[in-house]
Amino acid sequence: MRWIFFVTAVVGCIILTTFIERPFQVIGWGISTISCLGWVVIAIQDKDTPRILMEAMYAALGAWGFINWLSL
């Protein structure tokens, strides 16, 4: 599962930094948010509280980015 979420994080970053068109940006934010949520689950399994908090913050910011792009 870690490799899947790593690849989704890379894909999300590539989309966010490469494509300027709005539909692609929304997809990039969505993929990044899903990746962060996956890392939250992995951190919970590892009982790594600092990483849980860090990834939860990134997931919340990713969700905000997703919603922000949809509302434009």
Image (cartoon, rainbow, N blue to C red):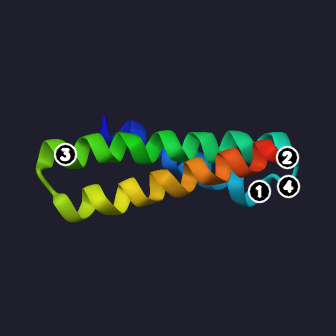
Q: Are marks 2 and 4 in contact (CB under 8 Å)?
A: no
Residue indicated by mark 3:
44
Q: Which mark is residue 20?
A: 4
Q: Secondary structure at mark 3?
A: helix
Q: Is residue 68 left or right of residue 19?
A: left
State how far apart marks 1 and 4 are (Cα).
7 Å
Furthest residue in direction front, as rendered: 71
Task: Mark 1 or mark 3: name the one nearer the start of the chain.
Answer: 1
The image position of residue 64, as x and y in percent, is: 61, 52
Question: For the residue marked with disc 4, what is the amino acid?
Answer: Ile
Bin the neighbour count of mark 3 within 10 Å (Cα to Cα): few under 14, some 14-19, many 20 and up. Answer: some
Question: For the residue marked with disc 1, what is the amino acid?
Answer: Thr
Q: Secondary structure at mark 2?
A: helix
Residue in the picture at 30% in, 60% down: 53
Residue in the picture at 40% in, 36% down: 4
Q: Are marks 1 and 4 in contact (CB under 8 Å)?
A: no
Task: Mark 3 or mark 4: name the one nearer the start of the chain.
Answer: 4
Q: Which mark is residue 22?
A: 2
Whether residue 61 is situated above or below residue 32 in the rendered picture: below
Asked where in the image residue 26 lies, by quadrant, the reply is top right
State how far apart marks 1 and 3 are (Cα).
32 Å
Q: Secondary structure at mark 1?
A: helix
Q: Nearer the viewer, mark 1 or mark 4?
A: 4
State how far apart marks 1 and 2 are (Cα).
12 Å
Whether residue 18 is situated above or below residue 66 in the rendered picture: below
